Image: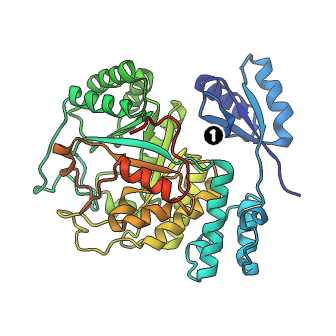
């Protein structure tokens, strides 16, 4: 018999965090998960627990005067519904049934899916992922816009063109007024979420970033995603208090040896701890990985996806490795597009409600591949909205494509998907 799960929705992030703490203290297994878009609630994170604990959980929350908003039965969509009339090999169907119907996630099953090569098998995997995306997220393609406000970085990651020792890179920093002005231009288009992205540049200290967050909130009311690399806990807390909503901190790989080789200045366990801090502070947290890193294999990617599931991150950015000039990996081959699409599809099946972008890195290798990404489980496009005079110097990898709103809307239209209602006519 399939296990039944429920989602407890709270009217605010503070109520959700308090609920999670209380239930955990009482020994009730509960996890934070992204709220299904159809729920129509203010808080973007729900608490998921098995039905056998539901009555006890609600009583604990009632006695402690914690408000709840809604109670939703988590729809366990069967693989039979997702595959429709597609006929699949028995073993593939069995693996997909375990993941989708029984919610059992094992490394060997994910590794098997990531190694699929047969055309019919791949059609089944991609169809299941796309149909699950349609069922739990809908047909709307969300639009986010990134302002890459500094390409200075104190780190020396082997794959990244912004690394400190890339002496050939022309460096820049945008002023706070420039960042605010660009954000206002995005707001005028109707875009609701801005991503403030940079290298790990501590010239922008806590006070200046708090001022920036507050000014953007006051002038535009936009949701703010920060992508600044690792910062101290006190800064995460200050940014959250100032009004930042989301934080994108990609893990890149959960293979400890590979992580250390690629990140000489970083520690994997510390990166994981930062992700926990962000969740505890009430951020909507994004993570992700790179497909095709030298020394990576399918099992590594399977373990990455299982970590995303364990952390229940809200956004998962999965992109192919693209070499960057001025880095130790400059002459390595790019990651495989098909491998990237398979990873996106498996992430959708395992992580269900999470937002998954079809990345700029995919478009850089092949513009049509970004469109294909939207047919294998992805539901988001991130625009490159850095001002033209700086954009060319944010060289995290070679020949980075400019994904603009016109291109995004053309992809959405060609695929018969829906653009966000919040966008204004352009």
Residue positioned most to the right = 1
Image point (62%, 61%), residue name: 130
Image point (18%, 50%), residue name: 393
The reply, left or right, for residue 380 in relation to residue 205 is right
Q: Nearer the viewer, residue 380 or 9?
A: 380
Image point (22%, 41%), residue name: 387
Quadrant where the C terminus is found in the figure: top left
Query: Image height check: is 247 above or below 288?
Result: above
The residue that label 1 is drawn on is 37
Q: Residues within 10 Å of mark 1 (few under 14, many from 20)?
A: few
Quadrant where the N terminus is found in the figure: bottom right
Q: Is residue 317 visible?
A: no
Where residue 311 appears, as percent x and y from the top left, is 57, 47
Residue positioned most to the bottom = 118
Q: Nearer the viewer, residue 142 or 260?
A: 142
Image point (55%, 44%), residue name: 314
Where residue 214 appears, as percent x and y from the top left, is 36, 20
The reply, left or right, for residue 339 in relation to residue 139 is left
Where residue 248 appears, as percent x and y from the top left, is 42, 43
Query: Image height check: is 250 above or below 221?
Result: below
Where residue 32 appears, as percent x and y from the top left, is 64, 39
Q: Quadrant of residue 388?
A: top left
The reply, left or right, for residue 419 in relation to residue 65 is left
Q: Secondary structure at mark 1?
A: helix
Q: Nearer the viewer, residue 48 or 123?
A: 123
Q: Is residue 369 visible?
A: yes
How many dots with numbers? 1
């Amino acid at each position: 018999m399939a296990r039944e799960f429920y989602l407890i929705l709270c009217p605010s992030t503070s109520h959700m965090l308090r609920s999670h703490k209380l239930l955990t203290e009482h020994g009730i297994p509960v996890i934070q998960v992204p709220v299904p878009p159809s729920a129509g609630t203010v808080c973007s994170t729900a608490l998921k627990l098995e039905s056998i604990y539901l009555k006890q959980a609600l009583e604990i929350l009632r006695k402690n005067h914690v408000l709840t908003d809604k109670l939703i039965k988590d729809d366990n969509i069967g693989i039979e519904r997702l595959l429709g009339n597609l006929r699949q090999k028995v073993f593939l169907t069995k693996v997909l049934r375990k993941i989708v119907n029984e919610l059992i996630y094992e490394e060997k099953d994910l590794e098997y899916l990531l190694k699929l090569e047969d055309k019919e098998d791949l059609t089944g995997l991609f169809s299941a992922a796309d149909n699950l995306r349609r069922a739990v997220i809908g047909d709307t393609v969300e639009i986010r816009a990134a302002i890459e406000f500094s390409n200075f970085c104190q780190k020396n990651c082997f794959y990244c063109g912004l690394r400190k020792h890339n002496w050939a890179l022309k460096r820049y920093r945008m002023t706070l007024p420039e960042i605010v002005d660009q954000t206002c231009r995005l707001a005028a288009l109707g875009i609701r979420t801005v991503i403030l992205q940079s290298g790990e540049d501590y010239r922008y200290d806590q006070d200046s970033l708090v001022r920036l967050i507050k000014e953007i909130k006051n002038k535009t009311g936009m949701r703010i995603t920060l992508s600044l690399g690792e910062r101290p806990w006190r800064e995460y807390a200050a940014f959250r208090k100032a009004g930042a909503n989301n934080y994108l901190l990609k893990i890149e790989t959960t293979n400890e040896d590979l992580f250390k080789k690629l990140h000489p200045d970083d520690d994997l366990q510390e990166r994981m701890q930062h992700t926990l801090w962000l969740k505890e502070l009430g951020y909507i947290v994004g993570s992700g990985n790179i497909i095709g890193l030298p020394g990576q294999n399918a099992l590594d990617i399977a373990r990455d996806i299982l970590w995303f599931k364990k952390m229940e991150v809200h956004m998962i950015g999965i992109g192919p490795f693209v070499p960057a000039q001025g880095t130790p990996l400059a002459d390595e081959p790019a990651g495989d597009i098909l491998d990237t699409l398979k990873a996106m599809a498996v992430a959708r099946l395992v992580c269900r409600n999470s937002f998954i972008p079809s990345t700029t890195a995919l478009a850089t290798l092949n513009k049509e591949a970004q469109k294909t990404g939207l047919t294998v489980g992805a539901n988001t496009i991130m625009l490159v909205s850095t001002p033209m005079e700086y954009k060319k110097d944010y060289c995290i990898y070679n020949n980075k494509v400019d994904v603009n709103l016109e291109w995004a809307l053309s992809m959405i239209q060609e695929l018969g998907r829906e653009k966000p209602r919040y966008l204004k006519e352009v």
